[in-house]
Image (cartoon, rainbow, N blue to C red):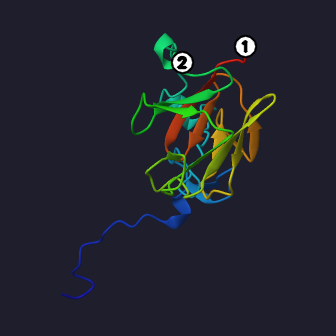
Amino acid sequence: MSTEDRPETPVESTASLQMRQCAECGSPVGSDSRFCSACGTPLSSESGIDAAQAMGETAPIPALDADVLSDVAPGDGVLLIQKGPDQGEKFPLDQETVSVGRGKASDIFLDDVTVSRKHAIFTRTNSGWVLADNDSLNGTYVNRERVAKHSLRISDEVQIGKYRFNFFEVPQQ
């Protein structure tokens, strides 16, 4: 079959593909993308609504059941999975430092490729709990902001990989 006999296949010009850049990492992303494929950051649309809002993920923090904190000692904290695998599971923050990661030696083991082996560390201080990212590949987020180090407040949303937690602490008496 000669080239003259072949039916034409429409080809989309690369000039017609609108590209933009991720504000977080600078990677190119398609105009219809809701998240950056390089870093996972939600992208804003022209309407000003970010991807998380468009997907209905900005719901208020659910009411905390009394039994969630019933076995937590004063000064200790707890992470409650709000979104992700094992939703509803809680992890105690009951040591001076608590490591989080995909590595088997982590105090909180999160089995997911979006989590680094030694992703982050929670540290108890005189003024409460501090979360520090451990140079993870995908970053650590508190209230949807990427952080290197952050002093936590009750009900803060912590995101590590695809896991979203709410942080709670029982005040010292």
Q: Is residue 47 visible?
A: no
Q: Give the residue number, with chain letter if any, for mark 2.
A: 69
Residue 170 lies in what quarter of the image?
A: top right
Q: Is residue 119 visible?
A: yes
Q: Is residue 2 left or right of residue 61?
A: left
Considering the image in quadrants, where does the N terminus appear?
bottom left
Tag shown at residue 39: none
Rendered position, 162 above or below 157: below
The x and y percentages for residue 142 are 66, 36
The x and y percentages for residue 2 are 23, 88
The x and y percentages for residue 3 are 27, 85
Viewer-proximal residue among 146 and 116: 116
Badge 2: residue crowd in 10 Å (few <14, some 14–19, many ≥20)? some
Residue at left 55%, top 25%?
A: 58
Viewer-proximal residue among 125 and 157: 125
The x and y percentages for residue 117 are 54, 58
Which element is circle 2 on?
A: loop
Which element is circle 1 on?
A: loop
Residue at left 64%, top 49%?
A: 120
Q: Residue furthest bottom?
A: 2
> Are the residues flagged by discs 2 and 1 in contact, CB closer than 8 Å?
no
Q: Give the residue number, with chain letter if any, for mark 1.
A: 173
Residue at left 65%, top 52%?
A: 22
